[in-house]
Structures are given as C-alpha cells and as structure tokens.
Image (cartoon, rainbow, N blue to C red):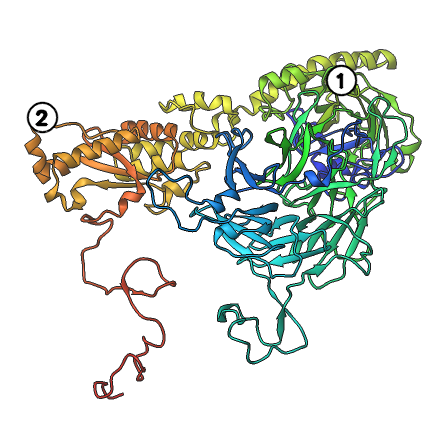
Amino acid sequence: MADIQGSRFHLLAGKQDWGSCRLPGGSTLALSWPPDAGSPPGPGAPLEWDERTRALRLSQRSVLFRRARSGTAPELSARRGADRDPDGATYWIDEEQRGIQWQRPDGDGGTRSTAAQAWWSVDDLADPTGPCAPGAFVPVEQPLPVDATLHGLAVTCRRQVVVGWQGTLDGSGASGGPGRSGLLVFDLRSGGEPLVLGWPDGSGFAPFDLAAIPGGGLLVLDRTARRFWRLDRDLRVPATMAPGPVPDFLPSETSPPPEHLPPRGSVVHTEGIELAGGVLGDTNPVAIEPGPDGAVFVLDSPAGAAASRLLYLPEGGDARVWSLADLVRVGDPVHPEREPEIYPVRGHDLAVRWPGRGPSQVCGCGGAHDKAADGSGGTDAPAVGPVLLVVDHGGKQVIAFQAPPDPGAAGSRLTVLDDYLPMRRFAGRALIMGSTDAWYDFGSRWVPLVRYVECLYAPLGVFTTPTGFDRADAVAGQPFDSASPGCAWHRVFLDATLPPETSVTVRARASDDADLLEATTWVPQPTPYLRGGGAELPWHDPWRDLGVEERARQRVGTWELLLQSVRGRYLELEVTLHGSGRQTPAVRAVRAWFPRFSYLAQYLPEVYREDTVAADLTERFLANPEGVLTALEERMEHVSVLLDPRQAPPEVLEWLASFVGLLLEPQWNEPQRRFLVRRAHTLFERRGTVRGLEQAIGIYLCPDPQDTILDGPSGQTGARVVERFLVRGLENASAENASAENASAASMNAVPVPAVDDPQSWLDPDVLAAHRYDVLVPGNLAAEEVAMLGRILEVEGPAHALAQLGSLGDLFRVGQARLGVDSQLGQEMGWPVMVLDRATLAGTLAAGSPFDISDRVVPGRDRVGEVPAL
C-alpha cells in the first residue's frame, strides 16, 4: 500500500509476526513462548503475547504460590460429600452426617446463593409420613429407629443425587443387619423417597468419596479398604471378563433377574478395584475423580509422607504415578527477586477442570485480564489435558496442575500452573466442579473459586525486528527491506497503549549490505508522541474495540516518531518496552514507512542542500508539515470510503442513512446497519408487500445479514406473514376469539387488532379476514426485540392493513389451514409413509420391515387363503 506521495510501509501485526522478532540473545520470541497458546512464558522470557488485546506486552511476573499462614488445617474427617446439579443448586452432607443440606442459586447466573436449607434426613426413613394428627390411623408396629450415617455425594448426568450410607435402614422397609452399607438414589425429576441400594453383606463396604462420570456412571471410593468401584449409568457394578465360565444353572433363590445376568464367560466384580501393590505401593487414597476415556484420577496421601501423589489409572492399562513433592515453588511477594523454594503439596481434596471450563478471575489492580479456561488460546491451539485442582492440606489455597493430553503416554508429567487460587474460611467440606467454575464451602455458603491475578510485570523487554533478508523462506513483509539502496527511512508508527509510568524507546540502524547490518551502529530515535488525529492510515482506527474512557485512561492510540539519520536498503529496529512493575505497555502493530518524501528535494532550490548539516535540519523541519499535509491529502484521496456502507466508519453510518431517508435504530447492530444502508433501495421498492415485510424482519433477526435475504428464495428469513383471507375455518370465529387474539398480541407488545363497535360484525368472516394479517416470528425473543418488531410492522407494513404479532408455534393450529402456505390446491399426491422412530410427525402411520414387503407372504400379516397369487 502506498500513500499519495508514493511512500510505502512494512508492517508487524499478529502473533506470527511478533514471534519472528528476536531477543537480545538471538532467539526469536516464538521460541521463548510455551507451546500451549495462552500459557505463561517460561522463566526469564521478558515479553508475551496477550490474546485478549492481540498485542505484545511485558511478561506477567505473578508470584506462583505463597506458603499458607499458620492456622488449623482441615482434617479428612471434615470432608463432606458435595456436588452441584446443572441448575446451579448445591447439595452436601451435614455435620452430623445424617442429613443433606442444599442451597439454590439466587437468579443471577449462580454467583450468589440463598441460605442453606435442610433437604433430607435419614430420620425421614423412620417416619416417612411425619407426625400423625390426633385420631389418625397409625401402623400397629412402629418402625424401628434408623442408625445410619452418610458418606460421599454426587449428582449424576441423569439428575440423580447419589449418597453413600453405612449402618441400618430398618425403618425404611429395606431390612439390613449390622454393618450394612450401600447407596441412596434421589431422583431430582420425579422427587419422592430415595431408592435404597444395599451392598452385599460381609463386603465391608465403606464409601468415602463419590464422583459422577460424564456421560453416565459413578465412581465410589472406599479409602478404608483402598478400593474403588466403577458403576454404570444404571448404578450397577459392570461385569468383568474372567476365564472361568458362569454355571449354566443357578439356585432360584439367589438368581438375579434375567436382565441383570452377566454375559457367559464373565463374573461380577463385586470386590472392587484395588488401589495398592505394584507400582502404587502403599496407598492412602483420599479423593477420586473421572479421567479421559474411562480412566480415573486418585489423590493419594500416604501416611507419614510430606507430599501427596496423583494416580492415573487407565481402564485396562498401566497405572501412572505423579509425585507432588517438587513441582511447586514458593515465592516471596515482597522480594520477588529471591530464589523460590520447593514446596511439597499434601492434598486434602481433588477436582478436575476439563478443557473449556475455567475459574472466575479478579485482579488486585482492578483491571481485566484474559486467560483461556483450559490454558489454550483458541481453536487452533494444541490439545491439552484436564487441569487437576488439588486443595492444599493447609486449606488456604488450591494448586492447579496441567495434565498432559495423553496421561498414559511414556514420560508424561504434570505441569504446575501459575494460578493463585486462594480460599477464605474454608472448612474442608469439599471442592466441587460446577458447569464453569470450581466451588468451595465458605462458612455456611458455597462460593466460586476465584483466580487472583497479581499485576507484577517484567520491568523491561527488548526485541528487534526480523532480519532474515537472505532467506528464501522469509515471510513476505516481515524483514524491513526497501529494495532501494540508500533509502531514507521516513517514520515509525506504533499502535500501542502506554499507561502512566510506562514508555517505549526505539533505536534504528540501516545498511545497503545485509551482512554488515549487525556491525552498523545503533542510532537512538526521538521519543514517540501520541497522534491527536488517530492513525496515519485514512479512516483506520486500530483501537475501535476499546471505549473512549479506556482509551483516555490507558493512553491508547497511534504513536509516531520521525526517523533520524537512517539511510540504507535494509532496516532493523530495536524496540524497548519500559514498565513500572504494576503496568505494562502493549504494542499491537508497528509500521515503518519508506522512502521519505522530501519537501527540501522537491520544492526548494539546490542552494538549500549545499550545507549537509543545514540540509538535514531543514529536511527534518519540513517533514513536520509534510506529515500533517500528507495525512489530509490521504483523507481527501480516500473520501470514497465514507460513501461506501461496507467500509465507512461506524460513526458515519447515520450520516449515510440520512441520504436515503433512513433513521437507524440504536438497537440494530453494525452489520445490520451497513446492510440497511447498502440495500435501502430494494427495501423501499418492496415496502408494504408481504415479501418486503418478511425481509425487513429477517434482517433484524439475523445478526449478520447477507444478500441472500433479499435476493434468495422467499421464506428463508425466519418470519412468516399469513394474510387472514387465506386462513380457513373462520366461520366459527366469534368476538371472544378476537379478544383472545388481542390478549396474545398484547403479551408480545405487538400491534393488536382494534375493537369493532358492533360485536355482531365479528361473526362475519369477511370482516375478520379483510385487510388483516398475522406475522409469526420465533417465540424465544426478548421483550425489547418484540417491541422492535412492532415498530417494524408499523413502518414496513401496508398502511391500510392491521397486523398481529404471534409465534411460529401458531403454525400448527387445529381447525385452520392456510391456503398457499400450509395447504396446496391440486391433485392429491398421497401421504408419505410414517415409520415410528424414523420419521417426523407427518403423514400416515405404517409398519416397518418385514410387514411392508409386498412380494411375499409375511407371517403375522397375511392369512392363508386370502393371499393373492404372487
């Protein structure tokens, strides 16, 4: 791209361009960045790419972790099973371990909750009907008291609350002797009493932790026996293959129902899966969570060990053990320059955060920071594994570990993340994972686990522009090559944000020989200044995504400097970002313009160039008005941009709309506004017609309308206009029907059908049908969207007709048929064949194969003697 004076520019913009820049040591920025996009750079990397602002900035130096302050650490006996359902309600076992508490969200997306309430108690099994009124009938034999405690809780994908129990549940009618245990299953959809699932007698089953498996199923951990069970979606222990055959006959009193029989050659694995021996050694499992592809994560805290272990147990594969003894470094927030010390992590609880989920985030400076929930930077980022959230035994914080994409691969290891996840007043009940955030108990409430970002940035970052001039594979536009020997490089523009106490300095050097560029002396350049008129490119705003207040606060814009004494074909820039430790500059793009259009050479006599020193001063002096005048000339040269609705700045669209008599509504987004202005002539031609009204509504309902809405076939806009005279079945209409339609229209803020002075006139179908029509739109619109559709009907609809707004669900209306819309005049073509589970609800019901075969006799369908000859 060349300006009106013939100058061009080289550009650095985007992550790929910035990654090709070099650090002082010689390596590129891309090599110093981690392979997982969005993750923090490695130790010592001074610069990082910020995905949120799409800019290069100083690396964040947040302290990894702090040593928890002195206090009472939660004991494992304080652990209570807890989980959240898809609606945001939290369930947990109470302190006495005999009841279940619950807390529902308070209508703001789940960030706040109501007070905790009692949801269920084991005492309800002893007296399920509650106290009896005087004179009421009571059982002759009173139920026995219930002596059971609850251990572990999980909410399955079937909306079932499953709780482990130990003791006796005689009062419920499920007989059991001492030492019985099992599961209680509550159905959140249907309600009612729980289903009691007893474990086999003599198994010694003692549930401690339960975890729901995505897609269905349940994990049950027995830390006393050091075993776990994997149940299927029906909460049954699946059969496992064994070499011994199953007997052909079983005693009738012990035989399970036929649908529960395991397949031949298999046995039911009722003793669970052992968590000891082999590579696991002596274990003390304290928490269990599902992993990928049927695998299991177990948090193991062996007795007497200073650190816990994370066990990865794939289904049918070899186990993997990760020690948490030397992964975490504890830094000093007061003296971050000190060498961090190794901190062994002993875990209290475990939760798994899958890719696509992430905790909320707050910042100590009140600013907004971006970090992908799964550690990835977008759809093009490499695959990452789940994040394992381990509650520190001190109870003050959660430490996050990034699991590899394939945990079972040889050499796979955990990576500690630099997320500071503090916990306040944590009583040790549980850490649970909701739909997006992790939650922990805060007194009597449950609050989300919040990532606290401490704004500590590297104080200095230096990089140089690429110099791969002689490489055949160099990316076009990255090396600053003017292709003109002795070129006078003109200006440098930086689209940057420079908060207070931050700055950017630039040095430059140029040479006609690329091999001699590194030996050329750096020339310091003037300090960049903020341009008052925005970018030098006509009608271009590189910071359009930021608001006016944020621009003023962060000193956002295009910064300019005039290059001094930089001549040569090849150019290299050294850019230094200076930060305050609490703030960082951010550079989105750099443009280096060349060659310089010299007013001295073009407009002044030769005598002004005889003295070299004076000529240099004069040229730089005249470059100031040249920069102002060239920018004005460029805007005049590209004034056509203001007249093109596809390219015009957003603030110009209302001015363009006034040319065609349009008044743009604030509720319409930018793509819709551009489309309205660009295709206004077509909309004016069709105003007042059925097609024009449908298309106007379709433009509003489509966030990014395309030409197919106006030029494509009718009926593709998401709206239906039905004229009343096409509707059949009006002979039974009455004034009450019209009143109901008025009420329906009022509920959607639509244009109602006006009242008629003579109620008897409503009995005339012609009166009901004349000059009236229904507009059917999707029924899931907000109130302000419905109000906007009402205004569209007033403007775009025919002036002599009355409209009523309704839902597309009204298309299926018993007793009415819309001629030309829902019905078609002509020869009957036959009903389509309707097959259950394979066709939509239309046509006639028909049987499937083999009852639809016509060239043979089908038993069960055809009778002997009544079958025609084949």
| Whole-percent x, y for residue 807 in the image | 31, 39
Amino acid under disc 2: Asp
Left or right: 834 with respect to 233?
left
| Whole-percent x, y for residue 340 in the image | 87, 32
Q: Earlier in the sequence, mark 1 or mark 2?
A: 1
Mark 1 crowd level (few <14, some 14–19, many ≥20, 10 Å Cα): some
> Residue 308, relative to residue 771: is it above or below?
below
- Which residue corresponds to the image point at 63% horizontal and 26% vertical from the top-left? 542
| Whole-percent x, y for residue 512 in the image | 86, 33
Q: For residue 55, which quarter of the picture?
A: top right
Q: CA distance from mark 1 to mark 2?
A: 76 Å
Badge 1 marks a residue whose secondary structure is: loop
Residue 528's tag is 1
Amino acid under disc 1: Pro
Q: For residue 215, which quarter of the picture?
A: bottom right
- Which residue corresponds to the image point at 60% horizontal and 41% vertical from the top-left? 97
